[in-house]
Amino acid sequence: MTQFHAPSPPTAAHHALLAAGIALLLITSPGTALAKRSSSDPTITSRTSPKKKGANKVTYQRSTSEETSAERDRRMYRECKGMHNAGACRGYTRK
């Protein structure tokens, strides 16, 4: 038969090692203040362009198979004749 041992509760030595490890990580990791460069640094200005390009206006081209608004009106008047005045037929039931 095998015996299982319950884990021992953390001791002061465990807490001290954990605190030392966290302190070491905080000291060796670069802080945000160290990573930032000042705006007067000449190497930054040479890498970036001085002007930012604005957003271009997007224009949509109509499909050749797309119907015009006049064609749609004629189709809606034709399809909605005698139907109820609701949904897509709203305004197309009477001429």
Image (cartoon, rainbow, N blue to C red):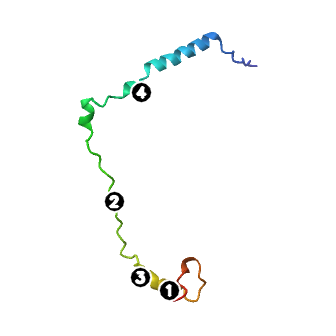
Question: Disc 1 marks which amino acid?
Answer: Tyr
Callout 3 touching callout 4 (CB < 8 Å): no
User: Label 1, label 4: how many angstroms apart (C-alpha)?
Assistant: 66 Å
Q: Which mark is residue 70?
A: 3
The amino acid beneath tag 4 is: Thr
Residue density around tag 4, few if under 14, some if 14–19, many if 20 or more, within 10 Å: few
Task: Using residue 55 as the reference point, say whether residue 69 is left or right of it.
Answer: right
Residue drawn at the location 23% of the way across and 35% of the way down: 46
How many C-alpha atoms fall within 10 Å of the one at disc 1: few (<14), some, or many (≥20)? some
Q: Look at 58% across and 89% down and name the residue there.
A: 82
Mark 1 to mark 3 CA distance (whole Å): 11 Å
Q: Nearer the viewer, residue 92 or 75?
A: 92
Q: Which mark is residue 61?
A: none
Q: Quadrant of residue 8?
A: top right
Q: Amino acid at mark 2?
A: Lys
* Nearer to the camera, 11 or 48: 48
Q: N-terminal of the two: label 1 or label 4?
A: 4
Where is mark 4, residue-wise? Answer: 32
The residue indicated by pointer 2 is: 57
Residue 66 picture location, percent across and down: 40, 76
Residue 69 x/y as whole percent: 42, 79
The earlier-in-sequence mark between 1 and 3 is 3
Rounded to the nearest angstrom, the CA distance separating label 2 from label 1 is 35 Å
